[in-house]
Amino acid sequence: MSIEPRIGPNGRDDDLTRALRSLYAAPTDDAYWASLAGRIMARLGGDAAVEQWWQPLARFARIGLVAAAVALLAARGGGGGAPGPPVGGPPGPHGSPSRGPGNHDAATGR
């Protein structure tokens, strides 16, 4: 038994294989390879400024600081406007937040 790769339900498609090979073949023009080699050598030769490892990250510093400030303002409730009522509601007769009917503190039994 021979193992032959299958393409599609009916086996190999030689016409498709030839068409794909022609599409993905390396360029045969010598000018392409000469220009590629020239670009690589120019990059290696130092024509372009060499970046340090932190320089790409430094570009995002301003964006990060603005995002952190927005998140801080959002966490603090926007930072403006009149303050709302306390979380527990208005103070009760003993200075603690009042509880509605049927709600009692399990720790104190009140």
Image (tube, rainbow, N blue to C red):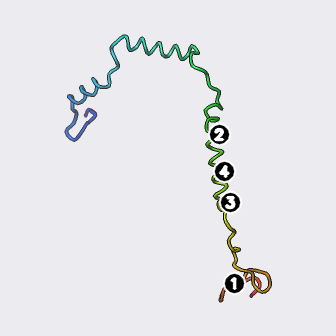
Residue 28 appears at what percent x and percent y?
33, 14
Quadrant (top left, top right, bottom left, bottom right) of the C terminus: bottom right
Name above or below for residue 81 compared with residue 31. below
Q: Mark 1: which secondary structure?
A: loop
x then y, percent, for residue 89: 69, 78
CA distance separating discs 3 and 1: 28 Å
| Residue lying at 75% horizontally and 87% vertically, measured from the top left | 109
Query: 38 left or right of 1?
Result: right
Question: Where is residue 51 shown, x and y percent of the image?
Answer: 62, 25
Closest to the camera, between mark 4 and mark 1, is 4
Q: Residues within 10 Å of mark 3 (few under 14, many from 20)?
A: few
First in sequence: mark 4 vs mark 1:
4
Residue type of the residue flagged with mark 1: Arg
Distance, label 3 to label 2, CA atoms, is 23 Å
Q: Is residue 22 above or below residue 58?
A: above
Residue that mark 1 sits on:
99
Q: Return the residue at label 4.
A: 69
Q: Type of residue at label 4? A: Ala
The number of discs equals 4
Picture residue at 63% right of the left edge, 44% below the top: 64
Residue 90: % across, % down? 71, 80
Nearer-N-terminus badge (3/2): 2
Q: Earlier in the sequence, mark 4 or mark 3?
A: 4
Amino acid under disc 3: Gly
Q: Which residue is mark 3?
A: 79
